[in-house]
Each structure stands twice: as C-alpha cells, then as structure tokens.
Amino acid sequence: MSNKRVYLFREGNATMRDLLGGKGANLAEMTNIGLPVPPGFTITTEVCNAYYAEGRKLPAGLMDAVREAVADMEKDLGKKFGDPENPLLVSVRSGSKFSMPGMMDTILNLGLNAQTITGMVKQSGNERFVYDANRRFIMMFSDVVLGVDKKEFEEIFDELKHKRGVKLDTDLTAEDLKHVCNEFLALVLTRTGEGFPADPYRQLELAIEAVFKSWNNDRAIVYRRTEKIPDEIGTAVNIQSMVFGNLGDDCGTGVAFTRDPSTGENELYGEYLMNAQGEDVVAGVRTPVPITELKAQNPKLYDEFFEIGRRLEKHYKDIQDLEFTIERGRLFMLQCRSGKRTGPAAVRIAVEMVEEGLISREEAIQRITASHLDQLLHPRLDQTGATALATGLAASPGAAVGKACFDADTAEKLGHAGEKVILVRDETNPDDVHGMLAAQGILTARGGKTSHAAVVARGFGIPCVAGCEAVHVDDKSRRLTVDGNVINEGDWITIDGSAGTLYAGSLPLIEPEISGYFGTLMSWADEFRTLRVRANADNPRDAHQAIEFGAEGIGLCRTEHMFFEADRLPIVQDMILAKSEDVRNAALSKLLVSQQQDFEGIFQAMEGRPVTIRLIDPPLHEFLPSFDDLLATVTELRIAANQTGGEAIKKVLEEKETMLRAVESMRESNPMMGLRGVRLSIIFPGIVEMQTRAIMQAAAKLTKAGQKVQPEIMIPLVGHVNELRVVQTQLESVAKTVCREQGVEVPYLFGTMIEIPRAALTADEIAEYAQFFSFGTNDLTQMTFGYSRDDAEGKFLTRYVDQKILPQNVFESIDTKGVGLLMKMAVEKGRGVRDGLKCGICGEHGGDPQSIYFCHEIGLDYVSCSPFRVPIARLAAAQAALMGKVKVTADK
C-alpha cells in the first residue's frame, strides 16, 4: 500500500480508477476541468483492502490523514466540521472501480448533533430544513452503522403523517420533524443501549468503516458475481461537503443521463424533485418529474446542466449518468459515471457515437457486452385485444410473464426452482437484488425511471414497470389490488417494460427481430473477427433461426434428438428390443426414411453451409422407459393380475415385464462412461450405418437438385485411434456406396469429437483418420475434473466458486489451465499430422465470451453455440481479434 491514503479531489484524475474508484476519479476529473463540484476527498481502495487484511480494523493513522483533508475542506468553504456556529456537513459514499449502483452504503448530512443543529438553523434561517436533514441522517446512520432497521424509523414517520392527515413529507412542520427526530433517537437508545454518537469525528470514523464493510454485504457480493467484478479490488470512500436540495422551493436534486438509457435516443433523460434530497429520487420515496420540466421552470439552470452533460459526454466519449443538486438556485455536480444502459440502448449509442465521430468502430464493438446483445433477443408483448390493468413508467424494456411474487427471498427460491415469477414490490431496495435477478420482470408501485428498481433492471436486462401508482401492494396479505381487481401471490401477470403496462394473466409474447443498429454493429463485428460462428441445431426450424442470427453453418446436429419425437420413439424402441436381425433391420429401415427427411430439411435450410452431424451418442436405455417407473408399473400389474386374473391385464403385464428385462439388462453403474458413442457404434453398427446412409442419401438428393451441401459426419466419444479407425472405415464404405448408387459426388468429411482426455493426448494418432476435430467441452470438462455435471452443479460447485477453490463455474467458462491445455495440445498435435485440420468447439462453452476469447487464442477455426447465442459469439469473436488493440472503457 502506498503512503498516501487520502486524495483531495483536486489531486486526482480520471486515470486513477484503480486507486480512487470510479466515483472518486470522476469527481476529481470534474473538479479539474472546472465544473461546479462541492469540495471533498477520497480514501483509496488500498485502505479498504488493508481494512480487511487487518481483521476489519481501520489502519493506524488513517483518521489523522482524514482530519488533514477535512481541514482543507474547511479552509476552502469557510466552515468548520462540528462547529456550532458555522458547521460543515458531509456525505460519505462508496465508489469502486466499477459502478455498482445501490449495492453499497451511503450516509448524508453527517456532522449533525444538538450543537450543530443550532448553528445550521442560524445559518439557513430554516428550522424545518434542518430537522428534515437531521431525521434523514439519524435514520441512514442508524441503519447503515448501528444496525437499526430503517423500517422501524419509517413506521414512526408514516404514523406521524397519518396522524397529521398528510401524504407528503413536505407537509410536515418543523415541530413535527423535531418530534420525529426525538422519537428516532429514543428508538436508537432502545435498540443499541448506547444512544446516538454525538461527536462528528466519531460519526465520520464509524461511517467510513461502515462503507468498507458494505463492500462485502450480501447484495454487493451477488452483484459482483453477476457482473464478474473481482472481490479483491475493494471500494474507495468519498467524503464530500454537503449541498442541500431540501432548503426550499429554489432547491432540488436529480439524476439524469445524457442519452436515454432505455432506447439510446440522443436526448437528455432524467428526473428531479424540488425541495428534496438525493435519496428521495433514487429510492422512489416521492415520484419525481421529468428533467424536461426544469427547462420550463428555470431555463437558465436547465441550459447550464445540459451543456455540462454534453461536455462530460464528449470528455469521456460515453453516455454519462449524472447526479446533481440545486442549492439556492445554484447548480452543483455530485457525480458522473458511464451510464448503465439497456442492450438496445447500448447498441444504438455505440453506433451513433461512431457516426458522430466520438469513437471508432473498434471501440464500439468493445463496448457491447454479451448481456447487451442478450437483451436485444428478448420477446415483446403481443398486445392485440389486451387491456392493461394499470400503467406506470416504462423503466426497463422487454415483456415478461410470470407468477406474482411479493418478496425477494420467495422470488429467488421459485426462480431457481424453474418457476417464472414477477417480483412485485411497493418499491425495491438494494436488499432485493437477489430476488430481482431471479425474476422474469419487476413491478413497483412507487419510484421513477431512475429509482433503484429501474437502474438495476436496466443493468441486467430485466423488464421493469416502475411507479405504477394505481397498484396497491399489500405485503402482509401477499396480494395487489388495482381498481377492484385482486392479484394474489401465484396468480399469473404480464408486464411490458417498454410501454409501462401491467396485465392480468399470461399473455402471448412475440419473438424479437434483428435489424437497424444491431445489424450495423454485427456487420462491423464480422469485419474484424477471424473465428467463424456456427450453431447447434437439430431441426430445420432451429437451422433457419441460426441463419437469421448470422450462423455460418451447423457445428452440432444431435441425431438422437430426432429419435425422441413421438412418431419415432416406438420405432426406436422396437429396434432396441428386437429379438432378431430381421426385426431390427425392419425398424432401422423405417428410421432411415425419417432420418433422411430430417437431413434434407436441415441441408435445405443451411443453403450450402457446412453441417456437422454427430452420430448417435447416448446409451440405448435412454430411449426406453425409466427402470424405476417400469418396476412400479410391473408391481402394480402383478398385484392386479393376481386379484382379477384377466387376460388383458396379463398381456399388458407380459409386455411390461419384457421391457423391464430389457431396461435392466442395459442398466449401467456409470452410463456417462459406459456403452455410448463410438462404443455403441462398434457393438451395434447397424444404427450408425443407417444414419450415415440417411445423411448421404439426403445430400445426394439435394446435390442432384443443384443445391450445394457440405455434410461433416462426426463420430463421438473416441478415446483410442483404433475405435475411430474401425467405425470410420466402415462408414466411409457406406458413404462411397451411396455416392456410387446415386451417381453423384458429395464433398463429405469424417471427423471426431475430442471429449475424452486420452483423445486430446493422442490427437496426432487420431488426426491420421479424422478430417476435423470438434471439442465437446462439456464431457471433456467432466472427464478432466472427474465431475458429474448434474451432481457437481447441484451439490458443491457453487460453494467451490464462492470459496474461490475454482475461479468460475468450469461448465460455464473453459478451465484454460486444464481443459484448455488439453485443447491446445490437441490442436497442435492434430495439425502437426494433418495440415490445415479444421478445429472447432460445439459444447455450451461455444457461446461464452471468455471461452471464445480462448478459442481464438489457440487458433480454432470456429465456435458453435445455440442459435440465440450466435450474435453474442460473433461479437465475442470480434472482441477477441481486437483484444489488446483497443482501449476499453473501464466502467461495467
């Protein structure tokens, strides 16, 4: 840790994000370019790490440095911290390198006590304002520092408003607020036994420590995991002199974005409240008004703010999220940061900033994240004939359908269990973030477009309707009412975050379309990337979808998925249970017709693009009923047969017993490592011979019709070159026979999946036969780690990641040091034997950006992923090609 622990705003700059955090660095930058920023200082992120390293203790000497910085502020402002005559009040806020809105703690109006209250009253001439500031301070400090739940303070406050017969905070008198403050202090004494600290420097020390503690609160940890923000970077603490938006009607506070963060439209977007403090806007305590109304109310002030916003956007070359306060008609800037934005907005802003000359195409590509593109693929609401129950604010775009749920814990529980839920709250707060992330959508009765719910929802691409004031949320009875309509917990509702509407029931959704700004950005990405992108698709429908999203071929067509269709499964079961080769061959002949039709449809959809078809992989028992279910059925039938002796029951029993014996004979202790893949092809060669014939006959038919086809036949689960040699030799004979029978030449390839560690280690031998490699990283990861994915993810993998035993879930991002090393080795060995060997990846990792970066690094030719991940893969491939060449904005 460096010797300097505290930086005055004038001592920092925008390049010091690692040390000062994003907020501190930007406050310093705004100060140094001459914007109206209240003076202050930043305690570095290094101090946060030292706090934890020393067992959650502030480093010795820190408060001496803090006192020196406060003295500098006092000199600048002509006020003194803790002075009863002319007191200085400060705010204490967090600020890590990456923006984490609402996840850590903030305290305003710090420095108030019995003596400074008197000075503030004299200074301001406004007793009501001072006691309003004090009740806010007591509540925030007690909640954040002393652990007294803010709900208890809110109940006292709401009860007084009810007694006075008023709805707005501003309707309470100075005497009312003085009474509230006394009630608050009494509550603190009751709950803590020690009372509220009066010494301003003691308040400041406790507040600094509380901000450091909040770095590891539950909501901050959840947010960091979701956003992949490192735990070790810590947070800075910003101490800034207070300016007051609640001094009177010529004062106010607001939050604004230099462009619309929902749509990306190039216009000032935001909200403000007069005679209010900042938390009133972001917490949704009062419903704010659009920033455009400030233009009518005070044109000069609006123009000043507009120009500052434009200046900051050009300075940072990105959309800015701005917090401001108006005190006695004077504008002060409290924060600027790169604005959180929706996926559609992010793409539009990036494209338009290129057109405006602010950034390059390369920078535009690097600014878009996978989650941004994912949001573009959200469905929208088909509103034909639907009548909205209520209308609120369109806070985060996209439509969502789910069961109404009234608390975050229940939403998380149901969401993780696979239920679709809409989190319904009067207003959300940072403690709700885990439930928000698990929900399909969010509905709040209060709050505006810059409320906590709106900001978090937009950041994560969750549809949100905020400030739906016609809705009354009853947490205790777990229901909402609107105009006499009652929605109970568990009832289906639909929200449209693009229109701000709420509907009863589950309404149909329309799939998204890709065009415009998205198409422009994708065309730029395609110019820069070298990795090709294919899709995993098992039918013509998925193939068409893949093409629409820009896929350049199919990297994995799983033939066994075709066997599970209702009209095919009985035939497959007949083939498996056949007692003679004639019966088995008859079943295979029926399947041949169906399989050929499948492949014809896929080849037609792909219009000459390469199609990699994996021959049957799973063990045969997967096509038969469950052993446990069959055993239960047979037991019940035996009992019934003994009781009734009916011939019909006996016949059914005989059929089920035959099936049970077959299933039992195929049971394996570890099916994943049993009779499947290439092993099954060796023991039951007729199945893959039929599949190869179907592939080649379909290809030959289309070739005769003048359509180009590129079939790539993939033999799975090879661990030894002799397995591949036996099966590939057999199937090449089938392929040649078909070409000879049909009188056409089809440009086919035979290859294998590299999904067993031994295959990677002996890839040079395997490449003597295989004409391409496709890495099946799901199985390769399982076999390298010795994990069963289904068991690992449910039982211990999450804990491994939490405890940093593993850096991430290895089934989501490739383990580059282990699995990745095997991949790299296989590529090098294979190409050492077969020059230009085509290598790709077809596991789920093929749609993960971090894994795609690695695939680019080791020189794969393509990645393959689900159709809806294709745009993300195209973007990630471009980002991989540009990595290290383009400076990327640090803000998340």
Image (cartoon, rainbow, N blue to C red):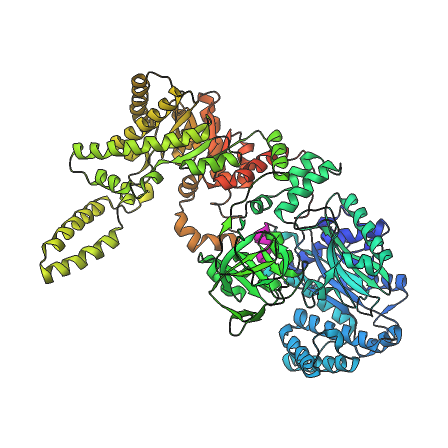
Q: Is 223 part of what is drawn in magenta?
A: yes
Q: Is residue 800 visible?
A: yes
Identify whether 148 is placed above or below 421: below
The secondary structure making up most of the magenta span is helix
Q: Seen in the image, is 734 located left or right of residue 817?
A: left
Question: Residue 143: horizontal and vertical position, in percent?
Answer: 66, 71
Q: Which image quadrant for residue 578? A: top left
Q: Seen in the image, is 861 located left or right of residue 363?
A: left
Q: Is 836 part of what is drawn in magenta?
A: no
For this rendering, which residue is in front, 218 or 748? 748
For this rendering, which residue is in front, 455 or 116? 455
Q: Residue at x 74, y 71 (%)?
A: 203
Q: Residue at x 44, y 56 (%)?
A: 418
Question: Residue 308: horizontal and vertical position, in percent?
Answer: 82, 51
Identify whether 570 is placed above or below 126: above
Question: Residue 547: horizontal and vertical position, in percent?
Answer: 50, 34
> The magenta stretch spans which residues?
221-228
